[in-house]
């Protein structure tokens, strides 16, 4: 099977597993796991942030950040396509007691002007706007990348408005290898950053939250409350260190293969339109009211797994285990596909 459902389906390589097996460990709830400390420091340093906190998932790092930045009754400004709003089980309301103000951006990306228009007046009728969160790349926006100049403008505006600025950077490394913007100058735009190691970077799990020392100290308490403290988890952090050494630059290959998929799909009679392919995610719209469910079933019969992304929309995601040969086979299968 060629699995294009997500970039989370790749298997840890032998080399990654070897690094995990030899990792020195300690009790991370006591803050004593040397491998976790190394990973946290490496990412904090890379993104020009003071400190980091290793967590089981990107949902947890996002939810912790939201909880630390806000008080119950506050409001979070985010895009209507954002993961924090759509795919975290209603966590903003459940964990932090906050409401959301949804911006209708361009493929999930919004501007400082959008933020300005959505900040509530400081009047007791309204909830207090207390956080701005963006996603880069935008998953539901088909892997769309923010223009770095816009991020700088947003960052300045948030600073001026005394609003913390959070990045859901589940796939921020995809954005960075594609744009060539330095990790440091990118990282210093934000008050907190969540990074996933289990997407394109290919580890079996784990995300890191970055921020100031005070912020991370409070995040540590919230991680405890959410039940996210793990013990000798350096074995998992080691996979992250391995990924940072070996799986960063190669993300460009995922992007190149996704672009090839997009170009090929655009030529097919049963495809109406393909969204711009900026990184490793390809979203396409089926022609003539064809159903995504039928497309998925037909692909499966030919050995390709993919996910519907709406009634008439499909998504392909390239990753570490989607090889050049798999690409070739996929293009052949797509050319012949009938449904
Ligand atoms: C995957 C993802 C997350 C985190 O998801 P987990 O499955 O909890 O690790 C957060 N934001 C975006 C945009 C994602 O794609």
Image (cartoon, rainbow, N blue to C red):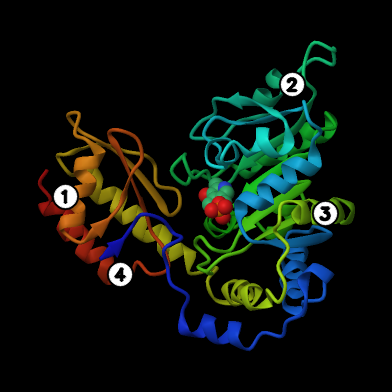
Query: Which comes before the other along the chain, label 4 or label 1?
Result: 1
Query: Which comes before the other along the chain, label 1 or label 2?
Result: 2
* Residue identified by numbered label 4: 324
Tag 4 and tag 3, C-beta contact below 8 Å? no
> Residue 299 location, x and y as percent?
20, 53
As measured in the structure, the alpha-carbon distance from the residue carrying label 3 to the one carrying label 1 is 48 Å
As measured in the structure, the alpha-carbon distance from the residue carrying label 4 to the one carrying label 3 is 45 Å
Task: Give the number of the mark in front: 4 or 3.
Answer: 3
* Residue identified by numbered label 3: 221
Query: Which comes before the other along the chain, label 2 or label 4?
Result: 2
Tag 3 and tag 1, C-beta contact below 8 Å? no
Number of other residues with Cα within 10 Å of mark 1, as a class: few under 14, some 14 to 19, many 20 or more: some
As measured in the structure, the alpha-carbon distance from the residue carrying label 2 to the one carrying label 3 is 29 Å
| Helix, strand or loop for disc 4 | helix
Task: Give the number of the mark in front: 3 or 1.
Answer: 3
| Helix, strand or loop for disc 3 | helix
Q: Nearer the viewer, residue 232 or 10?
A: 232
Identified at 53% across, 80% down, the residue is 16
Number of other residues with Cα within 10 Å of mark 3, as a class: few under 14, some 14 to 19, many 20 or more: some
Q: Is residue 20 above or below residue 166?
A: below
* Residue identified by numbered label 2: 119
Query: Which comes before the other along the chain, label 3 or label 1?
Result: 3
* Residue identified by numbered label 1: 298
As measured in the structure, the alpha-carbon distance from the residue carrying label 2 to the one carrying label 4 is 47 Å
Tag 2 and tag 4, C-beta contact below 8 Å? no
Identified at 83% across, 28% down, the residue is 161
Going by the picture, which residue comes out furthest to the right? 214
Task: Give the number of the mark in front: 1 or 2.
Answer: 1
């Amino acid at each position: 099977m060629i699995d294009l459902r997500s970039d989370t389906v790749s298997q840890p390589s032998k080399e990654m597993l070897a690094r995990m097996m030899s990792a020195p460990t300690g009790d991370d709830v006591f803050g004593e796991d040397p491998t976790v400390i190394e990973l946290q420091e490496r990412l904090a340093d890379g993104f020009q942030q003071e400190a980091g906190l290793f967590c089981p998932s990107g949902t947890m790092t996002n939810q912790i950040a939201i909880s630390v930045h806000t008080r119950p009754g506050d409001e979070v400004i985010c895009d209507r396509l954002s993961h924090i709003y759509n795919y975290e089980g209603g966590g903003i309301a459940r964990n932090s007691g906050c409401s959301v103000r949804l911006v209708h951006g361009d493929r999930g990306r919004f501007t400082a002007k959008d933020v300005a228009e959505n900040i509530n007046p400081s009047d007791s009728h309204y909830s207090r706007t207390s956080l701005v969160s963006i996603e880069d790349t935008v998953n539901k926006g088909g892997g769309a990348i923010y223009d770095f100049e816009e991020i700088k403008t947003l960052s300045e505006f948030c600073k001026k408005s005394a609003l913390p600025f959070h990045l859901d950077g589940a796939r921020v490394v995809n954005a960075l290898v594609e744009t060539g913007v330095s990790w440091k100058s990118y990282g210093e735009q934000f008050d907190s950053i969540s990074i996933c190691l289990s997407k394109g970077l290919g580890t079996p799990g784990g995300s890191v939250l970055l921020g100031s020392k005070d912020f991370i100290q409070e995040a540590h308490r919230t991680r405890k409350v959410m039940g996210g403290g793990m013990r000798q988890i350096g074995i998992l952090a080691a996979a992250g260190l391995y990924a940072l050494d070996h799986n960063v630059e190669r993300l460009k290959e995922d992007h190149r293969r996704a672009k090839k998929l997009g170009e090929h799909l655009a030529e097919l009679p049963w495809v109406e339109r393909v969204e711009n392919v900026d990184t490793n995610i390809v979203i396409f719209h089926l022609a003539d009211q064809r159903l995504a469910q039928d497309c998925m079933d037909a692909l499966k019969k030919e050995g390709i797994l993919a996910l519907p992304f709406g009634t008439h929309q499909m998504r392909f995601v390239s990753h570490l285990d989607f090889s050049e040969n798999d690409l070739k086979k996929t293009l052949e299968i797509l050319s012949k596909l009938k449904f």
